[in-house]
Amino acid sequence: AKEFGRNNLQVFTAEMAAKAHEKLQLQEALREAIARDEFILHFQPQMSLASGRIFAAEALLRWQHPQRGLISPATFIPLAEETGLIVPIGDWVLRAACRQAKAWQEAGLPPLIVSVNVSARQFRERNWAARVAAVLAETGLHARYLELELTESLIMQDLAGAIATMHELEAIGVHLAIDDFGTGYSSLSALKRFPVSRLKIDRSFVEDIPSDPDDEAITAGIISLAQKLGLRVIAEGVETEAQVEFLQKSGCDEIQGYFLSPPLSSRDFQALLQGCDAD
Ligand code: C2E
Ligand code: CA
Ligand code: CA
Ligand code: CA
């Protein structure tokens, strides 16, 4: 029995060593990924329920790994955050998203807002708002076509600092949204102090509509709270017609999700927009 135990332990440590090695390899590859031009952005449309118009797109990062293929951000964003690589990667995302939005405008498409996810590490960089302004100047995109998505937990980690940076960003003219709303711990009184224009209702509430009455109540509650605070509200992860009906009935302003479209390559996104134009 003792022998067996030791073998087990050896297997276990070997497995752990392999995992650690794999993580290290991924980390090394991640470090090289920008220089090797392995990142791409996909874009997921956002639609106004009142007008049916696609008015914005969320930029979502993808990693085209030479051996492993397309890697989802859920796999490498946590590692990028842990290692600090999220800062240069986030800079790349911001620049690429602004450049793409500007290119679509120059191609004659109706101007869209591009929405970019921001990680806590990035947001806390010194003079971050000035860096955002520099990217806008460099790409020629007007600030009103950029939205930054911040999570509640990012804001709550350093409430006073976050509110100060949010005001700097507001002064530049970019829009701010709270992502994954309802999953964090921001108090309602804090929410009142955030200079944000939109709340994004987290997918976890939307996914069980209409079967879960609690999730329906939470979703309707967030929508009415947002309206009272003068904020717009978008539901993410909308997949079914029944969800759209519920959201419409509850006064939700906007939707994003597979019901409309999955995230698309920039070329497919442009084709989608041009298709809408032709209708
Ligand atoms: P998120 O910001 O909540 O983005 C929405 C995620 O939900 C995306 O996953 C999107 O593909 C997925 N999604 C959209 N509609 C539906 C739907 O109808 N049903 C379902 N089941 N899923 C839907 P994705 O692209 O895998 O991104 C995952 C997360 O990775 C994002 O969650 C965000 O937190 C992070 N992320 C992505 N790009 C970036 C980035 O450029 N910077 C940072 N810091 N984080 C990013
Ligand atoms: Ca997001
Ligand atoms: Ca989200
Ligand atoms: Ca749920």
Image: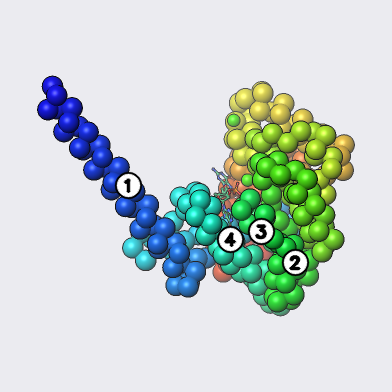
Disc 3 marks a residue whose amino acid type is Glu
Asked whether disc 3 touches disc 4, contact meaning CB atoms under 8 Å apart, the reply is yes
Q: Is residue 41 left or right of residue 36?
A: right
Mark 3 = which residue? Answer: 125
Label 4 neighbour load within 10 Å: few <14, some 14-19, many 20+:
many
**Residue 209 versus residue 132 in the image, above or below:** above
Q: Position of residue 31 (x, y in %)?
A: 45, 64
Mark 1 = which residue? Answer: 19
Q: Position of residue 202 (x, y in %)?
A: 65, 39
Label 3 neighbour load within 10 Å: few <14, some 14-19, many 20+:
few
**Residue 32 versus residue 254 in the image, above or below:** below
Asked whether disc 4 touches disc 1, contact meaning CB atoms under 8 Å apart, the reply is no
Mark 2 = which residue? Answer: 130
Give the CA separation, mark 2 to mark 1. Answer: 39 Å
What is the number of the mark on residue 87?
4
**Residue 51 versus residue 243 in the image, above or below:** below
Disc 1 marks a residue whose amino acid type is Lys
